[in-house]
């Protein structure tokens, strides 16, 4: 298994455009998380999926953001009408429910720059 | 709410120096504690963890002890190497009905000079 993958690795867009990122978790991991990391800060939780169900969304996730995980495998994060404040690294992590504490494995991230 | 406060960086040390990166936390409930490391150009990797008070997590020569009385989880290494240069994040997690979301500190950039 090659770990968590994210595409694209970099995205540059103009303000007002829509963007979509993809995350492929480690196969058979049923839990998937999205985080956002701005420059000089630690990652901040955005949303959580268990299988295909989106069970929690952070207040950081405005109504311009939507995430899906159809069939409980890969996930997409879409940002509509991007703003310059959306510029950040978007991280995906996955874990499996195997015990009391489940390590999250992180992907390399998608760096978004909004001009 | 939950939060993590880390020592401000950047930190620059000479090879073989002793390292301490301070981390304190505030949590509603009983958290598990983690240190993650981000090497240049790579994703976050779990370095070590501790799940209950007085537990010591260790990996690659790094150690951290879960101190409930001081709400701290300081990272230490006795002799750092150039390859330890990275950004280090302290984090906590409280399992909320299966949601194990992590709350991170701001990160500490460590540079080791030969």
Image (cartoon, coloured by chain):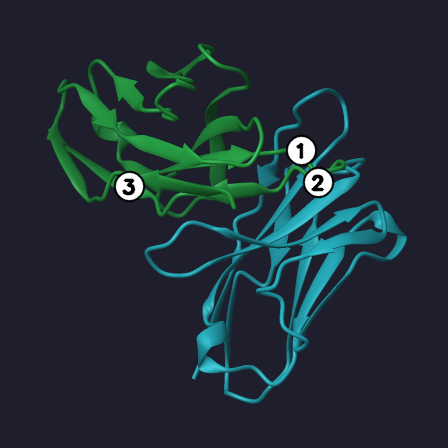
Chain colours: A cyan, B green
Q: Distance of mark 3 from mark 1, alpha carbons? A: 25 Å
Q: Nearer the viewer, residue B106 or B47?
A: B106
Query: Mark 3 or 1 closer to N-term?
Result: 1
User: Disc 3 on helix, strand or loop?
Assistant: strand
In this image, A70 relative to A56: left or right?
Answer: right
In this image, A70 relative to B34: left or right?
Answer: right
Q: Name the residue under label 3.
A: B108
Chain name for mark 1: B
Same subunit, labels 3 and 2: the answer reads yes
**Residue ID at (62%, 42%):** B101
**Residue ID at (66%, 48%):** A33
For marks 3 and 1, give the one nearer the viewer: 1
In this image, A31 relative to B14: left or right?
Answer: right
x and y percent of residue B59 in the render? 42, 16
**Is there CB contact under 8 Å for labels 1 and 2?**
yes
x and y percent of residue B38 in the render? 40, 40
Query: Mark 3 or 2 closer to N-term?
Result: 2
Chain name for mark 3: B
Q: Is residue A85 above or below residue B89?
A: below
x and y percent of residue B89 in the render? 39, 38
Chain name for mark 2: B
Q: Residues within 10 Å of mark 1 (few under 14, many from 20)?
A: some
Q: Distance of mark 3 from mark 2, alpha carbons? A: 26 Å
Q: Quadrant of the C terminus of chain B?
A: top left
**Residue ID at (58%, 31%):** B29
Q: Name the residue under label 2.
A: B99
Same subunit, labels 1 and 2: the answer reads yes
Q: Name the residue under label 1.
A: B95
User: Disc 2 on helix, strand or loop?
Assistant: loop
**Is there CB contact under 8 Å for labels 3 and 2?**
no
């Amino acid at each position: 298994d090659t770990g968590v993958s994210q595409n694209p690795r970099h995205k540059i867009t103009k303000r007002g455009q829509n963007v979509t990122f993809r995350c492929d978790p480690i196969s058979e991991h049923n839990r998937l998380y999205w985080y956002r990391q701005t420059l000089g800060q630690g990652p901040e939780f955005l949303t959580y999926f268990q299988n295909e169900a989106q069970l929690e969304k952070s207040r950081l996730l405005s109504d311009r953001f939507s995430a899906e995980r159809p069939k409980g495998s890969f996930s997409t994060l879409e940002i509509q009408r991007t703003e310059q404040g959306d510029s950040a690294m978007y991280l995906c992590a996955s874990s499996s429910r195997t015990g009391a504490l489940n390590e999250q494995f992180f992907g390399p991230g998608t760096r978004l720059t909004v001009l | 709410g939950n939060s993590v406060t880390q020592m401000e960086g950047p930190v620059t040390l000479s090879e073989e120096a002793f390292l301490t990166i301070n981390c304190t936390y505030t949590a509603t409930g009983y958290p598990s504690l983690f240190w993650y490391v981000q090497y240049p150009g790579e994703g976050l990797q779990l370095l070590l963890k501790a799940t209950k008070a007085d537990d010591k997590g260790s990996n690659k020569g790094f150690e951290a002890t879960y101190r409930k009385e001081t709400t701290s989880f300081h990272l230490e290494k006795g002799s750092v190497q150039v390859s330890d240069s990275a950004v280090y994040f302290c984090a906590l997690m409280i399992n909320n009905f299966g949601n194990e979301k992590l709350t991170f500190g701001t990160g500490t950039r460590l540079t080791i000079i030969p």
